[in-house]
Image (cartoon, rainbow, N blue to C red):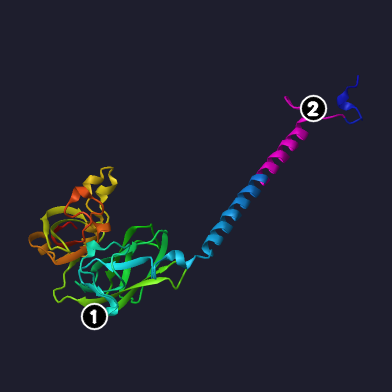
Amino acid sequence: MGGPWISDEREDPPIPLGLNEMTIPRAAILASIGTIAILLLSVIWVGWGAYVFVGQLDKAFATVDEDSLKQGDRWSWEVMLLFETCEPRDDAWAWPENLSAQDEPFWLPGELSCEWEHQGAQDRAVFAINNAGNETLDLQVSLSTENVVVTHPSGGVLTVEPDTAELVALQVTGDIEEETFVITVAHATVSEARVELEVHLLADSASMDLNSSPGQRMTVHYQVWSYDTGEDLDEGDLPATAGEDPMCDTGAPWLCYIKGFGWGLVGLDCEFDRCAFFAGSTLRVLLPPELAYKDRPDREPANNQWLLFELSINELYL
């Protein structure tokens, strides 16, 4: 007796357990829906990326109103080496008789010419950029020499918020007897908006082996005066960090030193033996109130004063 398995007519193949004739169409539909969803997400992602890119492109090429970059007839930022060796550039203006009594947004009436007596290759110095305006500035720093480089901050554009000052560290890279170079701080998109600082670089005959750098720990001897009155305010010895003070990020800001003090320590020098047994070279650092005690009535008589620090290393921790 014949059975279906020997029939001449083709029968449907056996259907595996759990499946039926609708399984394959349903799977195809689900796969299609998944593909469409992926395509939609891809279109959205690409579209968002294009939107962000165009926005950044528009921002990069946006026209900046030059008047917004000025305070009166000056660009709204100024540049100053922290050393007490600066004077009016090209005798274009008169040094104020009382710096702290000025009631205008700028530290000084115009561009500066400063002297930097370096202690050999790898020596460092710091200059400040003061934003005296009401707009956030994106600035670029360039030097007219290859014998000095910027070591801090890294990157090409420095953002300076209104009524604040940022600091930039320099480093000597070779054996230089004497050179004059220019530091140019220009707006990132308005090339003609630029402020310059002239620096006379001189080699000190008593060159030192060790030069303090940002982040380096040390103990330092300091003495501080009011620049305008000559009043002796304080003297002592402190453990400190050159550059940014790490104690300012601990949640206890009262433990950190003033901004300009740490940056004034960058560039202190000493010999290998003198760092352990004798004081090294001495720097005289001039700090405006924004880098010292601005609007701090609890710090009289240093409140809103230009402060002159004399600094030297007791010990430099290598």
Secondary element under disc 2, as helix, strand or loop, is: loop
User: Marks 1 and 2, Cα distance to the nearest angstrom?
Assistant: 96 Å
- Structural crowding at the residue carrying mark 2, measured as other residues with C-alpha within 10 Å and reported as few (<14), some (14–19) or many (≥20): few
Seen in the picture, residue 234 relative to 40 is either above or below; the reply is below
Q: Which residues are magenta?
A: 11-39
Amino acid under label 2? Pro
Q: Which residue is mark 1?
A: 178
**Residue 316 coordinates in the image, percent (x, y):** 16, 58
Q: Which residue is mark 2?
A: 14
- Residue at 24% x, 76% y: name it: 201
Which image quarter holds the C terminus? Answer: bottom left
Amino acid under label 1? Glu
**Residue 266 coordinates in the image, percent (x, y):** 23, 62
Seen in the picture, residue 187 relative to 239 is either above or below; the reply is below
Q: Indicate the quadrant where residue 126 lies.
A: bottom left
Q: Examine the structure image and report whether residue 167 is included in the region drawn in magenta.
A: no
- Structural crowding at the residue carrying mark 1, measured as other residues with C-alpha within 10 Å and reported as few (<14), some (14–19) or many (≥20): few
